[in-house]
Image: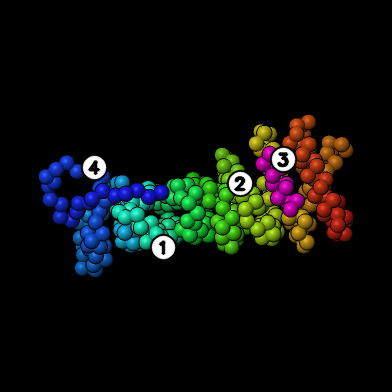
Amino acid sequence: MLSSAPHARGFLHNPAPTQPQPRCQAVRVAELSRVLQLLQDPLSSSLKERQIFILKKVVKQCQRGFLLRDLADICKIINVCAERVSDHPEYARILCDLLQICSLPFLKEKSSDEMSYAAVVTDCVSQMGFLMRIPLPEVRRQICSTVIAFYSRDKHKHRSDGERRDPATLVMSLALMEEQLPVKLCLLQTLQILSRASEVNCNLMLRAQGAQKICFHMSEGDPSGELLFRSSEILWNLLENGSRQEVTSQLSSSDCIASLKDVFLHLLLKGFRHHERQLRNDLLVLLSLIAEKPGAPLIESGFLKHLTPFLTFPELKSHNPLVRNLKLSFSQEDFEMKKLLLNMIVVLSRDLAVLQVR
């Protein structure tokens, strides 16, 4: 979605207007070039206060959005701010403001601007994922919000070059979020939206080992349950819109099976709400798909040994501590789980090694 821009006044030399002006105006490309020159001039490093002042003025005068023809300079300004954040925290607020404006529709002056600057838009949105390296939560949150906004307004146009490059970089960023659970949840929400109805996005996420990386984090502690819910949704999106063979291949590692096993057992033994039982069954379907893949280490991971006591519960009494406090009802979800368990055993029984497990 693009909008037409009004005539713009300058901000480096801004004479008093003789007539009322729009409250939000776009900045001329020539003047943005001068701002960029000021920021990149090694002799101006001691003029930080002046640079901050000019950047704030850019933000103020671009509140309606950035001109398409100015976008290349804006991206360079964003990168300069990103480079300085670690040593000069004052740039963090400006960086967030610039990224927030990027979430607005880009402005065009001519009808041909949309085609003329398509490659610039692609590069600009692609670079946002790399800014996740900045360890500040507020910056990372704003990046996620901007990508979501851009994708949400642009997905119906099928101009997906820009958004196609984002998911892989965002997937790689998961490893940077170990100590920032709220930001990780925001990132997972972004990946959930990007993968919801896009085959291209899903396959690019899989190319970055997205299914495996997301599965690794599923068993991490999160009292809200949001991490598990969003991770599961992403895996299902990848299955439905991407390559099912690639998804099951990535989830067939010992680490992934162990993570899925821990989450499944947790939901089975401690999940009593309706949506928790549904999620438990969804994970069991994932494990069933993995079981169909020859060589999947379900025995080596210990999952099959943990699974067998539930097959005959509650029909047969057992002293196994796993089923001591287990309670199953006559609900549709519990009935569905029993069918899924039996189906998995049928699939696994094709392997003679499985028959020896007790």
What range of the chain is rendered magenta? Answer: 278-289
- Tell me which colouring the rendered structure shows: rainbow
- Which residue is tagged 1? 119
Please tell me how crowded label 1 is: few (under 14), some (14-19), or many (20+) other residues with Cα within 10 Å. Answer: few
Front one among 161 and 146: 161
Eye-nearest disc, 2 or 1: 1
Alpha carbons under labels 4 and 1: distance apart: 30 Å
Q: Height in image: 102 above or below 165?
A: above
Numbered disc 2: secondary structure: helix
Please tell me how crowded label 2 is: few (under 14), some (14-19), or many (20+) other residues with Cα within 10 Å. Answer: many
Q: Residue at x 78, y 61 (%)?
A: 294
In the image, is residue 288 part of the stretch drawn in magenta? yes
Q: Specify whether 16 is left or right of 255.
A: left
Q: Height in image: 275 above or below 25?
A: above
Numbered disc 3: secondary structure: helix
Numbered disc 1: secondary structure: helix
- Which residue is tagged 4? 23
Q: Height in image: 308 above or below 123?
A: above
Given the image, on which type of amino acid does mark 4 rest? Answer: Arg
Q: Which percent across, then down, holds residue 332?
A: 75, 34
Q: Residue at x 80, y 42 (%)?
A: 339
Front one among 177 and 246: 246
Mark 3 or 2 closer to N-term? Answer: 2
Given the image, on which type of amino acid does mark 3 rest? Answer: Leu
